[in-house]
Amino acid sequence: MPDYAPGTPSWVDLSSPNTDDAADFYGALMNWGVTEPGPPETGGYRMFHQDSMNVAGLAGQMQQGQPTAWATYISVADADETAQKVKDAGGSVILEPMDVTDIGRMAIFADPTGAVFGIWQPKTFTGADLVNEPNSLCWNEVLTRDADACKAFYPAVFGWAPVRPSFAGAPENYTVWEVAGKQVGGMMQMTDEWFPPEVPPHWSVCFAIADCDATVAKARELGGTITTQPMDMPIGRFAGLIDPQGAAFAVMQLTAAS
């Protein structure tokens, strides 16, 4: 099981208006199985799994207007202490720290630019059992219209250091977040050319896949939308997708050296 040091994204989940339809789509696209809905105290929370390993969560929408979206959760040692750091750094609290049965403690925040993210203080559940392998999470990044604000906020909350990407050909407006010299996530400065003004700042999730072009073709067949056609990058072959219910995500066919 991966080791998630504090400040490392450890889990993602999907908020969906119809979890059965979402399970069908991602099951066919990513070859994921899914658990039956959990008990009422969990809101019927479900787990996507790959070869019996938990790779992501699936939840219904609990209130009117809740977006259909993938959420990123960052591992922390103390959820309440992190909540105070968020407030002190100019972020806002959407959901105050709360216990999730006996498996952990969570909270939901928005950074000063409006991008929403979660935190996870693990108890018996530490996060995804599998990452950086085909059909599992491989990257999380915040897309923002004010990178300078984020460069002040996230280091204050998580101790992240903003650095330039180490690979050749990286976009000028891209930042990599590091903790103790280890890459834990990224940040992209949004521009109107690539992200129309109606697209709000947000955290994006990217899943590793074995064949980018085949996955994109399958997504289109299943009713998904392709927002970024497959393109080669120094670290692999990338594409941007939206599932049939409206949740955006990315896929990456990693190179052997990634």
Image (cartoon, rainbow, N blue to C red):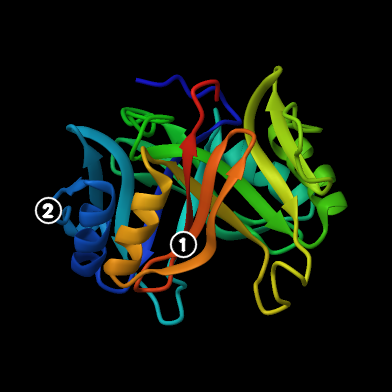
User: Which x, y percent locates residue 143?
Assistant: 68, 56
Q: Nearer the viewer, residue 201 or 229?
A: 229
Q: Locate the N terminus and report the quarter of the image it occupies.
A: top left
Q: Eyeballing the image, is 161 above or below 257? A: below
Residue at horizontal 87%, vertical 50%?
A: 148
Residue at horizontal 53%, vertical 60%?
A: 229
Crowd rating for badge 1 (residues with CA inside 10 Å; few <14, some 14–19, many 20+): many
Amino acid residing under circle 1 = Leu
Q: Eyeballing the image, is 252 above or below 59? A: above
Residue on which disc 2 sits: 36
Q: Nearer the viewer, residue 78 or 240?
A: 240
Q: In the visual, does 61 lie left or right of 249?
A: left
Residue at horizontal 39%, vertical 76%?
A: 63
User: Which x, y percent locates residue 102?
Assistant: 29, 36
User: Closer to the observer: label 1 or label 2?
Assistant: 1
Is residue 107 visible in this depiction of the protein?
no
Residue at the left extreme of this rendering: 36
Q: In the visual, does 36 lie left or right of 136?
A: left
As drawn, the label of residue 75 is none
As drawn, the label of residue 241 is 1
Q: Nearer the viewer, residue 36 or 233?
A: 233
